[in-house]
Image: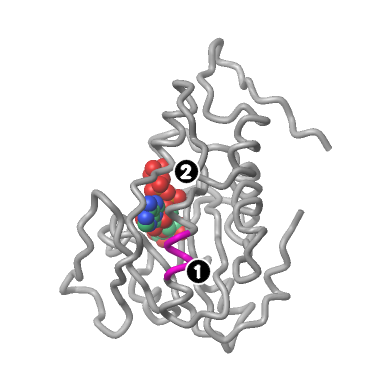
Amino acid sequence: MTASVAAFSARRLGVMGGTFDPVHNGHLVAASEVAALFALDGVIFVPSGQPWQKADREVSAAEDRYLMTFLATAGNPQFTVSRTDVDRGGLTYTIDTLRDLRALYPDAELFFITGADALAQILTWRDVHELFLLAHFVGVTRPGYHLTFDASLPANSVSLLEVPALAISSSDIRDRVGRGAPIWYLTPDAVVRYIVKRGLYRPHRDGTDPVPPVAS
Ligand SMILES: Nc1ncnc2c1ncn2[C@@H]1O[C@H](COP(=O)(O)OP(=O)(O)OP(=O)(O)O)[C@@H](O)[C@H]1O
Ligand SMILES: O=C(O)c1ccc[n+]([C@@H]2O[C@H](COP(=O)([O-])O)[C@@H](O)[C@H]2O)c1
């Protein structure tokens, strides 16, 4: 079940990075809207390996997050998923993601998509100034967050875009699963089924992992 990113030939490529624990319709709508308005040839979803800014909480296994992202994007020929951050090992930094994608697509223009909350933190990211040489950044609106242009961001390398407002977050989905509330229509059906089958986000009763291995 691996998508071949190298097979994705394109000149204008979106890059949607995220923890995707789990991926949801807010991510998918944001990527689709940026693809349409920036005339992108496609969008590569890049699930993080180990997100260093989320070290204070438990994050699901990278393989589960990768597979859910694969399932969520499989029906859209404009979307694909990269394993680059999952397979690199160690903490995930976007500078490495963009260097890898630049090497794979030396001629493509890269557009890195971030929600308003992530954009507000971007000056804390590793090698932030080199990031702006490798990609154009598109900050998108997100309910509950204010999308602003920080004066210290390079004006030519960052755009802001209003996208349809979906008040969906991965943390709310995890919380809903934990208390038995429905998550249908917040994320694609295939992702809901994957979460149920794997027992993700259910409370651990005895401190052991309640999730059985995926059947091969
Ligand atoms: N509903 C949404 N609308 C627009 N952008 C979003 C939305 N949800 C997430 N994003 C953006 O998608 C990227 C990846 O987000 P991430 O995987 O951390 O999801 P999340 O919902 O923010 O997760 P969590 O609730 O666990 O923090 C980030 O740039 C984030 O700002
Ligand atoms: O490179 C960094 O220092 C950095 C710090 C925080 C977040 N990011 C990236 O921003 C994207 C969204 O992150 P998150 O934590 O909101 O899922 C994802 O691709 C992360 O790898 C990158």
Residue furthest to the right in view is 216
Which residue occupies 38% across, 45% down?
A: 168
Tally the numbered discs.
Answer: 2
Mark 1, residues whose alpha carbon is within 10 Å: few (<14), some, or many (≥20)? many
Do we see residue 54 in this rendering? no
Instruction: Identify the secondary structure beneath mark 2.
Output: loop
| Position of 79 relative to 166 (above/below) | below
Quadrant assignment, res 123: bottom left
Is residue 44 visible in this depiction of the protein? yes
- Packing grade of label 2 (10 A; few <14, some 14-19, many >=20) is many
User: The C terminus is located in which quarter?
Assistant: top right
Ligand 1 lies under 8 Å from the Cβ of mark 2: no
> Quick check: 96 left or right of 63?
left
Magenta stretch encompasses residue 85: no
State how the image is colored.
one colour
Instruction: Tell which circle, 2 or 1, labels the residue nearer the N-terminal end.
Output: 1
Q: Quadrant of residue 54?
A: top left
Coordinates of residue 71 in the picture (x, y in percent): 65, 51
Residue labelled with disc 1:
15
Instruction: Report how far apart the C-alphas of labels 2 and 1 lie in the structure.
Output: 22 Å
Magenta: main secondary structure equals helix
Inspect the image, locate mark 1, and give the three-letter code of the amino acid beneath it: Val
Question: Circle 2 sits on which residue?
Answer: 186
Q: Which mark is residue 205?
A: none
**Residue 156 percent location from the top left of the image:** 29, 85
Numbered range of the magenta stretch: 29-33
